[in-house]
Image (cartoon, rainbow, N blue to C red):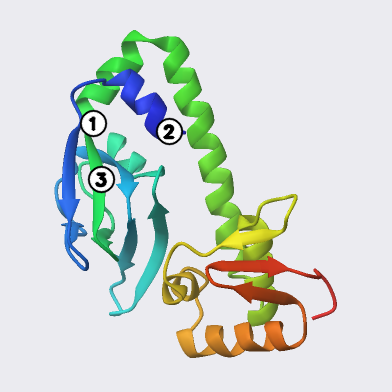
Amino acid sequence: MLTNILDKLVSGSAETRELDPHQFLFRQGDRAHYVFAVEDGHVKLTRYLSNGKSVVMLVARAGETFTEAALFSGLYHCSAVADVKSRVRAYKKKDILEALKSDPSLALEYAARLSRQVQRLRTQLELRNIQSAGERMLQFFLLEAHPDSLEFKVDVPLKDIAALLGLAHETFYRELARLESEGVITRQEATIKIERTGGI
């Protein structure tokens, strides 16, 4: 996990912050001094556009880092708000940059992890080009599911997944019910299991 690498890079200097539900960690346009990691809960990153609309860029879960772009930017380009009671670790970006310069092997490992994270995010963005809402949702579940069990653990609100996929939550819930009624998926508590992957 990237959090493990950050702890190696700047061990002992990270701060822990507690967030209440709907509390902002930072707002779009704030000065960027930290890279963050979620210890518990989840944090939603939203970018607000000039036309008044907003786009959910990421829902960071426990064990995931976010705002790595802040390492080379003076400002945060989106807002971060806790969906539920959450705890995050804040790493000073100046400490990270100094550590990356002094430890090339860790710097390479960090770069490799970031590269994999970028690939995953690009794949999620490509999902938005799928016209069919049901197919878009199914491909997202496949992307996030365990490869052996084809089970996706739902650990964030469904409305956040809908926003991440660029779907109105009414459309998302309607398509979710359809996928379940047609036997494409089954749902149990906080788990969605993919039963078949084609012909929806």
The residue at which mark 1 appears reads as 93
- Location of residue 196 with respect to 34 vertically, above or below: below
Residue lying at 34% horizontally and 27% vertically, measured from the top left: 6
Query: Considering the image in quadrants, where does the C terminus appear?
Result: bottom right
Q: Could you tell me which secondary element the residue under label 1 belongs to? A: helix
Residue lying at 24% horizontally and 49% vertically, measured from the top left: 87
Q: Is residue 90 visible?
A: yes
Q: Position of residue 107 (x, y in %)?
A: 42, 19
Q: Which mark is residue 153?
A: none
Report which quarter residue 78 is drawn in. Answer: bottom left
- Nearer the N terminus, badge 2 or badge 3? 2
Q: Could you tell me which secondary element the residue under label 2 belongs to? A: helix
**Badge 1 amino acid:** Lys
Residue lying at 66% horizontally and 60% vertically, measured from the top left: 151
10 Å crowding of disc 2: few (<14), some (14-19), many (20+): some
Query: Position of 182 compared to 57: left or right?
Result: right
Tell me the CA gap for discs 3 and 1.
15 Å
The residue at which mark 3 appears reads as 88
Q: Position of residue 164 (x, y in %)?
A: 47, 68
Q: Could you tell me which secondary element the residue under label 3 belongs to? A: strand
**Badge 2 amino acid:** Leu
- Nearer the N terminus, badge 3 or badge 1? 3
**Badge 3 amino acid:** Val
Tell me the CA gap for discs 1 and 2.
14 Å
The residue at which mark 2 appears reads as 2
Q: Is residue 136 visible?
A: no
